């Protein structure tokens, strides 16, 4: 009887503790991980420096540093930190995940990559959806 209770308790703990959501262990996943880690430092200069290595030259040319700095500040206001809530899609061409905003709404991050190594980020889109409040 006691052994059964212990086993049931252990099984309940296993299902109650969700596994952390992780990025794929691929060059593309590592680019996104570096982007997120730089963002989560909270330091604009660190973030902009990381952009130089994680983003494709074409994307950097389309979004100059001043624009990326404004994006950083806006995202810091919305998300504070980027923490992946759930993965939506992972392919060599695209990684899509959902992160929670500070207000409980969700943001969908879509990263696309160069076709050849080093597979830097060639496109980044962030869509925010407001949930209905009851």
Image (cartoon, rainbow, N blue to C red):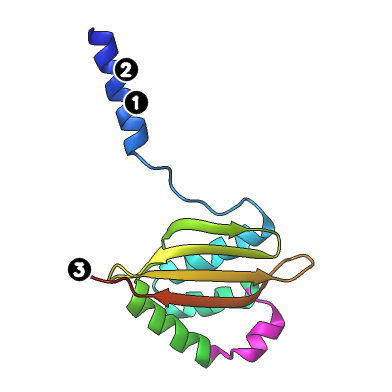
Residue 11 marker: 1
Dot label at residue 134? 3
Q: Which residues are magenta?
A: 55-65
- Tell me the CA gap for discs 3 and 2: 39 Å
Question: Tag 2's secondary structure?
Answer: helix
* Contact? badges 1 and 3 (CB < 8 Å): no
Numbered disc 3: secondary structure: loop
| Residue 1, image x, y percentages | 23, 7
Q: Nearer the viewer, residue 63 or 6?
A: 6
Asked if 20 appears above or below 39 in the picture, the reply is: above
Q: Residue 7, which numbered label?
A: 2
- Crowding around mark 2 (Cα neighbors within 10 Å: few <14, some 14 to 19, many 20+) is few
The residue sitting at 60% across, 70% down in the picture is 111
Real-space Cα separation, disc 1 to disc 2, in angstroms: 6 Å
Type of secondary structure dominating the magenta stretch: helix
Which residue corresponds to the image point at 28% horizontal and 12% vertical from the top-left? 4
Where residue 80 sits, quadrant-wise, is bottom left
Q: Does 63 lie within the magenta span? A: yes
Q: In the displayed structure, does residue 93 sit left or right of residue 132?
A: right
Q: Nearer the viewer, residue 19 or 53?
A: 19
Tell which of 81 and 90 is nearer to you.
90
Residue 99 locus on image (x, y percent): 42, 64
Residue 75, by quadrant, is bottom left
Secondary element type, mark 1: helix
Q: Are marks 1 and 2 in contact (CB under 8 Å)?
A: yes
Badge 3: residue crowd in 10 Å (few <14, some 14–19, many ≥20): few
Q: Which residue is depicted at the point 55% across and 89% down?
A: 65
């Amino acid at each position: 009887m006691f052994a059964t209770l212990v086993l049931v308790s252990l099984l309940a703990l296993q299902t109650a503790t969700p596994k952390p959501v992780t990025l794929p262990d691929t060059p593309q996943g590592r680019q996104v991980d570096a982007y997120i880690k730089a963002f989560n430092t909270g330091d604009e200069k660190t973030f902009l420096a990381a952009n130089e290595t994680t983003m494709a030259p074409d994307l950097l040319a389309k979004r100059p540093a001043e624009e990326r700095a404004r994006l950083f500040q806006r995202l810091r206001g919305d998300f504070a930190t980027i923490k992946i809530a759930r993965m939506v899609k992972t392919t060599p061409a695209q990684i899509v995940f959902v992160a929670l905003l500070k207000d409980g709404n969700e943001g969908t991050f879509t990263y696309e990559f160069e076709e050849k190594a080093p597979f830097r980020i060639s496109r980044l889109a962030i869509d925010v959806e407001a949930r209905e409040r009851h």
